[in-house]
Image (cartoon, rainbow, N blue to C red):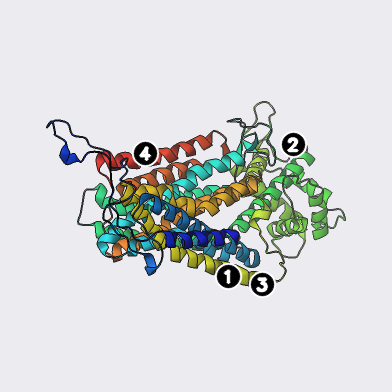
């Protein structure tokens, strides 16, 4: 509350200390008209580096809503950008905290998959929306660069600076190319410390890379130097962007269910590999014949050893005793569930007893599956087939990549007074939405006025400064979460970053394209689109096919940020790209 009162006090004081300015800049230097030209020398100052006087000449400004303060001075607009940026950060914080409270009560699924990503992108979407709704189409065309700068800056900052910072603060010791939870004895070693994630994080990175497709489509007419199809390209890109937004939200809603199914299947394969390895040891390596086929006689003897009451069939209790005797150290196994799945695989007669023929048939099927996965090859020295061991290693790796049961099978814990917490969550979401909506327009106006007063393109201001306000809450949350130094928290951290960029590329871009199409604006953002494509494709490809990131990988992310800014400057100033 103290921060909110302080911000309101700033606005109150500034309103009474500044009013629409009408001022003339006074200089002690001679007027250019008093100088004599030599007819040769001309000076051209780069427009991106030349600052105008801190007080503008004979200019006025328009108060937002008729009462919010405005100014034409550079320092005054800088102050307004800071104040409105803090308010936008406050809105993002309210939205983030309210979303977490709602998730605590309702759990994942609709809330975690649909509302959280949309609410996280809401401040950015608001700023983009008001940047294109302001005044006449000519004014909107001028201010819409603020929205594009925010979109590009937010995307680049999340998967460069924030991504690299999460690698640094979340680093653990690497053992066999996998981070060991909670260990950090290697310090800042570039190759022996880093972070590991699960396979679902790789999927999130791939989705992020795919989400740039609408950018490619809307940019095609300019790439082909065509002017006739630009409006149609905007419409097609808008349709595809909205379709991808809906598809992504549906995927997020059903992703926990998909993850649970995948993990359950991986656990079942792990049980199969564990039983086969155990039977191989019990058979003293004779589970297979010399040509690699299942040894029926040995399997019969193993069946008789498991059939303790010699009834000719394996009951549920006998199977459970057999499975309990096998050590499954790598996974937290539910023995009863494992017995049910083994019974379902073997008991084809559905009489709740596994007969000898069913046992032989079931083991034979499992061995053939292991051959397909592990590769049936003969060790030249030992003279034994090793595909069962390879199958076991593959199932261990698959289970590790899918993550822990805790992450995939999230259950909403009992909370005290859920009605009060629900009311608090809704109130925080409402306040955050109202603040974001109310101060988006004055923030865009302050950025535009500061750009006019300093000759710095509004794109660069929005690219560097505005993401600090709209994404600070996500950035701080991600970095703090990464400090827990666990694979699970690292997976959630990087998945959140990839998800935030994906929402920028589909939700915020959909809002932007709708503005361009409805208001008849010109799509002329080649350099910005190129930066987004380069960063998303490079980081997406980099994170799509690996689950461990040594410490040196953060240097790639840190290099991409200044490279992106320099690329936009070079393309704009030297090549005239917008």
> Which element type, helix, strand or loop, lies under badge 4?
helix
Q: Secondary structure at mark 2?
A: loop
Name the residue beneath numbered marker 4: 566
Q: Which residue is mark 2?
A: 285
Q: Secondary structure at mark 1?
A: helix
Residue 20 on image: x %, y %: 34, 60
Marks counted in the figure total 4
Q: Position of residue 512 (x, y in %)?
A: 36, 59
Residues at discs 1 and 4 in contact (Cβ within 8 Å): no
**Which is nearer the N-term, disc 2 or disc 4?**
2
| Of callouts 4 and 3, the N-terminal one | 3
Q: Which residue is mark 3?
A: 420
Q: First in sequence: mark 2 or mark 3? A: 2
Q: Residues within 10 Å of mark 4 (few under 14, many from 20)?
A: few
Query: Marks 2/3: CA distance?
Result: 63 Å
Marks 2 and 1 sit apart, C-alpha to C-alpha, by: 63 Å
Q: Position of residue 261 (x, y in %)?
A: 62, 58
Of the numbered discs 2 and 1, the one sitting upstream in the chain is 2
Give above or below for 392 relative to 61. above
Residue wearing tag 1: 426
Q: Nearer the viewer, residue 533 or 92?
A: 92
- Check whether the beta carbons of the residues at disc 2 and disc 4 lie within 8 A of each other: no
- The residue drawn where x is 38% and y is 52% is 213
Q: Residue at x 21, y 51 (%)?
A: 226
Mark 3 Cα-neighbour bin, 10 Å: few <14, some 14–19, many ≥20: few
Quadrant that contains the N terminus = bottom right
Q: Quadrant of residue 443?
A: bottom left
């Amino acid at each position: 509350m103290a921060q909110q009162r302080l911000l309101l006090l700033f606005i109150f004081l500034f309103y009474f200390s500044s009013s629409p300015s009408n001022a003339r800049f006074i200089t002690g230097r001679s007027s250019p008209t008093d100088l004599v030209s030599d007819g040769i020398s001309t000076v051209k100052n780069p427009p991106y580096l030349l600052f105008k006087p801190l007080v503008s000449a004979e200019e006025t400004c328009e108060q937002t809503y008729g009462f919010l303060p405005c100014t034409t001075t550079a320092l005054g607009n800088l102050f307004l950008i800071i104040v409105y940026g803090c308010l936008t950060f406050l809105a993002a914080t309210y939205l983030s905290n309210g979303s977490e409270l709602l998730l605590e009560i309702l759990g994942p699924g609709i809330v975690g998959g649909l509302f959280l990503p949309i609410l996280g992108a809401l401040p950015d979407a608001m700023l983009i929306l008001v940047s294109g709704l302001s005044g006449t189409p000519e004014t909107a065309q001028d201010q819409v660069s603020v929205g594009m700068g925010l979109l590009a800056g937010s995307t680049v900052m999340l998967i460069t600076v924030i991504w690299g910072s999460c690698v640094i603060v979340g680093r653990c010791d690497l053992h066999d190319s996998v981070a060991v939870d909670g260990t950090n004895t290697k310090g800042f070693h570039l190759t022996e410390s880093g972070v590991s994630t699960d396979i679902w994080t790789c999927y999130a990175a791939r989705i992020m890379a795919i989400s740039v497709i609408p950018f490619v489509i809307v940019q095609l007419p300019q790439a082909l130097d065509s002017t006739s199809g630009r409006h149609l390209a905007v419409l097609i890109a808008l349709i595809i962007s909205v379709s991808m937004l809906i598809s992504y939200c549906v995927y997020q809603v059903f992703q926990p269910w998909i993850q649970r199914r995948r993990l359950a299947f991986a656990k079942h394969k792990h049980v199969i590999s564990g039983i086969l390895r155990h039977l191989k040891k019990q058979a003293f390596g004779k589970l297979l014949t010399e040509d690699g086929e299942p040894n029926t006689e040995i399997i019969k003897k193993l069946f008789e050893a498991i059939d303790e009451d010699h009834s000719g069939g394996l009951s549920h209790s006998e199977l459970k005793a057999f499975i309990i005797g096998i050590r499954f150290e790598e996974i937290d196994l539910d023995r009863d569930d494992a017995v049910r799945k083994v019974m379902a695989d073997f008991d084809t007669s559905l009489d709740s007893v596994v007969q000898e023929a069913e046992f032989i048939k079931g083991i034979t099927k499992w061995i053939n599956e292991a051959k397909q996965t592990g590769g049936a090859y003969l060790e030249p020295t030992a003279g034994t087939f090793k595909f069962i061991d390879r199958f076991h290693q593959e199932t261990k790796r698959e289970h590790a990549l899918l993550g822990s049961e805790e992450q995939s099978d999230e259950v909403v814990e009992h909370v005290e007074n859920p009605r009060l917490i629900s009311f608090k969550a809704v109130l925080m979401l409402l306040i955050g939405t109202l603040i974001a909506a109310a101060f988006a327009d004055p923030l865009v106006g302050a950025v535009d006025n500061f750009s006019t007063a300093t000759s710095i393109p509004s794109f660069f201001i929005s690219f560097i400064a505005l993401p600090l306000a709209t994404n600070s809450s996500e950035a701080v949350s991600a970095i703090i979460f990464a400090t827990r130094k666990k694979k699970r928290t690292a997976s959630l951290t990087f998945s959140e970053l990839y998800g935030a960029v994906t929402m920028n590329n589909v939700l915020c871009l959909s809002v932007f394209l709708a503005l361009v199409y409805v208001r008849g604006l010109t799509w002329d953002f080649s350099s910005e689109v190129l930066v987004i494509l380069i960063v998303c494709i490079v980081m997406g490809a980099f994170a799509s096919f690996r689950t461990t990131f040594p410490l040196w990988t953060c240097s790639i992310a840190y290099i991409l940020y200044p490279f992106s800014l320099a690329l936009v400057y070079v393309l704009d100033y030297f090549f005239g790209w917008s």
